[in-house]
Amino acid sequence: MKVKPHMTKKRGVKSRTSSSVANGQSVYVVGLISDTHGLVRPEIAQAFDAVDLIVHAGDVGGRGVLEALRRIAPTEAVYGNVDDPSDPFLARERTLPIGRLTLHVSHGHELGSPSADLVLARYAGDVLVFGHTHRSLVERRGGRLVVNPGAAGPRRFDVRPSVARLTVEGTRVDVEIVPL
Ligand SMILES: [Zn+2]
């Protein structure tokens, strides 16, 4: 089904002025992005079409990135190892309600070389998002979901830039890696 754009509250997407409903459940779509390193590719507007919220997992690379993302949807961001930890728009980590589920995001450099195992062991939440490795990853473990959307910024190594779209419907969550 198609999720229509609508207004959201500042934190998370728990309450909204209108909602898309499927089978009696509200549907929330969240755009996941990381490691932009100062670059917002034009394809991102299409990849994040009609999302309720954008979550940036760090290594933002400047205020202009968040301004560009906010023109698409409300954006929550954490700082990575290249960002200024004192930037008031960036936090070390964020815990966001997405409908009935909880999403946790941090950059992952605080874990050294982040992996699904390390993130699952360290953080609480139904959906755990990290970045830093520049490699996309989707892993389900005991009802929990770990996502690294990959790097959306300048191409590095042999890795194609990507973002991810997360869809939450009740307690069901799906994720799609979107190559840019
Ligand atoms: Zn990093």
Image (tube, grey):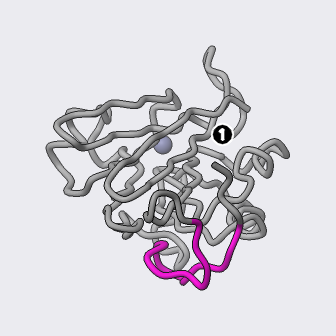
Magenta segment, principal secondary structure?
A: loop
Return the residue nearer the eye: 27 or 151: 27
Q: Name the residue under label 1.
A: 152
Residue at the spot 59% in from the left edge and 52% down from the top edge: 31
| Position in image of residue 3 (x %, y %) | 65, 58
Residue 44 to residue 28: above or below: above
Crowdedness near tag 1: few (<14), some (14–19) or many (≥20) residues, C-alpha within 10 Å:
many
Question: Which segment is the magenta one?
Answer: 5-20
Q: Is residue 86 left or right of residue 47?
A: left
**What element does badge 1 sit on?**
loop
Residue 69 to residue 121: above or below: below
| Position in image of residue 98 (x %, y %) | 41, 65
Residue 175 to residue 57: above or below: above
Amino acid of disc 1: Ala
Res. 97 image quadrant: bottom left
Residue at the spot 54% in from the left edge and 83% down from the top edge: 9
